Amino acid sequence: MHIARVIGTVVATRKVEQLEGSKLMVVQALSPEGEPTGRPLVAIDTVGAGPGDIVYYVRGREAAHTLEDKFNPADAAIMGIVDKVDL
Amino acid sequence: MYIAKVIGDVVSSVKYETLHSHKLLIIQPLDPDGTHAGEPLMAIDMVDAGKGDIVLIVDQGTAARQVLSQEFPTIRTLILGIVDRIDVSGGTAG
């Protein structure tokens, strides 16, 4: 899992049915010190994150497993909202 | 699997249900000789590791399925052990 900031949301009314009803957020990966790293990506959200939140996300099949229907094409999913990072 | 150092932890009260009973640590992947090898990331602690520990990491869903006995794992990066010592031919590290 990687720490990231939610920098936006994606609305896509026409999409594959497996993604119907899932929230799509734009996330920017951050280093533990809070520096942006790498390209922003689109992750599904199941914990109720909003723009500006510091979150953490998982990539790969594990991301798809956060939805009800486990067989969906998502490859990134927000797993939680950060309260505090201690280094 | 690979070696990493625990460099911090994440406090998070709102999170996906399968994460609730686990400590979330930040790890810095290392080469066996101790040099940094890639970006820090977060891992689920299975052995009560703490900041400064050198640990053994697996970063793969099916491994998480076995360790956590979850049919559809939502976790892939796990701390499997705390390293006491690494003997690499040509010198000791860690």
Image (spheres, coloured by chain):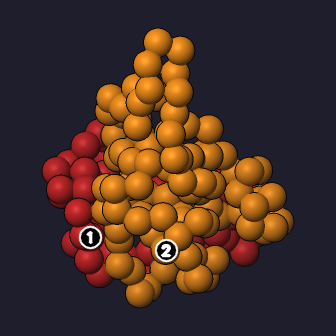
Question: Which label is found at residue B13?
Answer: none
Q: Residue at x 71, y 57 (%)?
A: B64
Q: Residues within 10 Å of mark 2 (few under 14, many from 20)?
A: some
Vertical placement of residue B37 versus B57, above or below: above
Q: Residue at x 44, y 26 (%)?
A: B92
**Quadrant in the picture for the N terminus of chain B:** top right
Residue B34 point in image, percent of width and height? 36, 32
Question: Which label is found at residue A85?
Answer: 1
Q: Residue at x 41, y 30 (%)?
A: B93
Q: Residue at x 80, y 58 (%)?
A: B66
Residue type at numbered disc 2: Lys
Q: Which residue is mark 2?
A: B23
**Shown colour of chain B:** orange
Residue B82 point in image, percent of width and height? 54, 54
Q: Chain of mark 2?
A: B
Farthest-out residue, bottom: B13
Q: Chain of mark 1?
A: A
Under tag 2, what secondary structure? strand
Residue B68 point in image, percent of width and height? 74, 67
**Shown colour of chain A:** red
Cα gap from disc 2 to disc 1, whole angstroms: 12 Å
Question: Which of A50/B65 is in front?
Answer: B65
**Quadrant in the picture for the C terminus of chain B:** top left
